[in-house]
């Protein structure tokens, strides 16, 4: 009886220790997000306006040029573009903190893990874009999307944010200068949000290029949004394929950020 009692106590203590460790990690994430996000917005509230305006710039241009014909594509594309932009912006911010303020050195010397640091800063980035995301989601539902697609849209928002934040963190860890970070992240932004069929129908591409576009994860994110909006999607594509591809990319990018990011400078 003593043996089983000691075993039970050991397991109970182990579970309690793991719970406390996870609780402390969440606390660290929230503190980082509060310091770099909410405190900044309290001192510079106009940052919220400037960040929110960015995703609507291309939406406005497409609306004017097409006389409203491609408004639905522009709205779905703006949502994907906003998520990509907020995720990749993490790379620019981390590079700035690392090279100018040397803040990362403080976190390296602390018990904060790289993924905790990344998640906290990524959460602060999404706070800046929250008003824009709310407006874009309102527009998507305003044009007639059923509420049954709410879980799908939440999944898209989370998975694109996680994937692009991981890319931004990985890139920033290898950037030694702010200028390099801006140039490379701008190029990745174009590759993910402009070139693939995000703002336009995939049917506009030749069949060969349609298959090439499937390599880009944001193509699937846009197709899932278009599917929820009632657009015709390719017969060789399905929502299940889109979800699977997004999950594979997200796991791959998180693994890349965790295993190959330069956390400690040598």
Image (cartoon, rainbow, N blue to C red):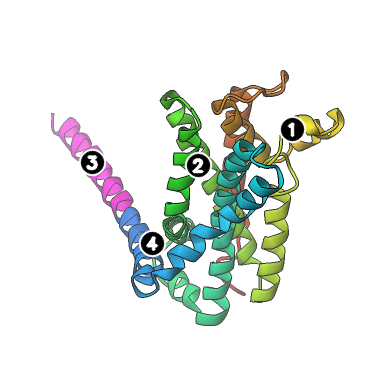
Separation of marks 1 and 3 at Cα, in angstroms: 57 Å
Marks 1 and 3: which is nearer the front? 1
For mark 3, does the 10 Å Cα neighbourhood hold few (<14), some (14 to 19), or many (20 or more) residues? few
Q: Is residue 224 within the magenta segment?
A: no
Q: Quadrant of residue 160?
A: top right
Sequence-wise first label, 3 or 2 = 3
Marks 4 and 1: which is nearer the front? 1
Please report contact status of discs 4 and 3: CB closer than 8 Å, yes or no.
Answer: no
Query: Residue 222's spot in the image, x, y percent?
Result: 62, 36
The disc label shown at residue 33, or none: 4
**Residue sticking out furthest to the top:** 235
- The residue to which callout 2 is attached is 157
Magenta part, dominant SS: helix
Query: Residue 134's spot in the image, x, y percent?
Result: 43, 46
Note whether 45 is above or below 145 in the view shown: below
Sequence-wise first label, 4 or 3 = 3
Residue occupying image coordinates x 64% and y 46%: 63
User: Is label 4 in a helix, a strand or a loop?
Assistant: helix
- The residue to which callout 3 is attached is 10
The disc label shown at residue 246, or none: none
Residue occupying image coordinates x 33% and y 53%: 26
Marks 3 and 2: which is nearer the front? 2
User: Is label 2 in a helix, a strand or a loop?
Assistant: helix
Sequence-wise first label, 2 or 4 = 4
Region of the chain picked out in magenta, as a range: 1-23
Query: Residue 136's spot in the image, x, y percent?
Result: 49, 44
Separation of marks 4 and 1 at Cα, in angstroms: 37 Å
Q: Quadrant of residue 94?
A: bottom right
């Amino acid at each position: 009886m003593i043996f089983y009692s000691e075993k039970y106590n050991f397991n109970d203590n182990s579970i309690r220790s793991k719970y406390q460790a996870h609780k402390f990690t969440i606390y660290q994430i929230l503190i980082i997000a509060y310091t770099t996000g909410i405190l900044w917005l309290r001192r510079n509230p106009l940052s919220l306006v400037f960040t929110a305006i960015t995703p609507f710039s291309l939406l406005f241009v497409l609306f004017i040029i097409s006389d409203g014909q491609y408004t639905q594509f522009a709205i779905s594309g703006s949502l994907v573009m906003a998520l990509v932009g907020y995720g990749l912006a993490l790379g620019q911010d981390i590079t700035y903190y690392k090279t100018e303020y040397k803040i990362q050195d403080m976190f390296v010397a602390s018990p904060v893990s790289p993924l905790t640091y990344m998640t906290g800063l990524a959460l602060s980035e999404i706070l800046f874009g929250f008003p824009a995301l709310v407006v874009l989601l309102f527009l998507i539902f305003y044009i007639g999307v059923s509420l049954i697609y709410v879980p799908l849209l939440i999944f898209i928002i989370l998975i694109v944010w996680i994937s692009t934040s991981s890319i931004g963190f990985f890139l920033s860890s290898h950037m030694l200068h702010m200028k390099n970070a801006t140039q490379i992240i701008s190029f990745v932004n174009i590759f993910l949000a402009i070139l693939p069929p995000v703002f336009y129908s995939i049917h506009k591409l030749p069949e060969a290029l349609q298959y090439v576009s499937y390599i880009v994860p944001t193509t699937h994110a846009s197709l899932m949004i278009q599917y929820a909006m009632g657009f015709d999607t390719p017969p060789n594509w399905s929502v299940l394929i889109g979800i699977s591809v997004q999950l594979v990319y997200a796991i791959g990018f998180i693994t890349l950020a965790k295993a190959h990011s330069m956390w400690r400078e040598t």
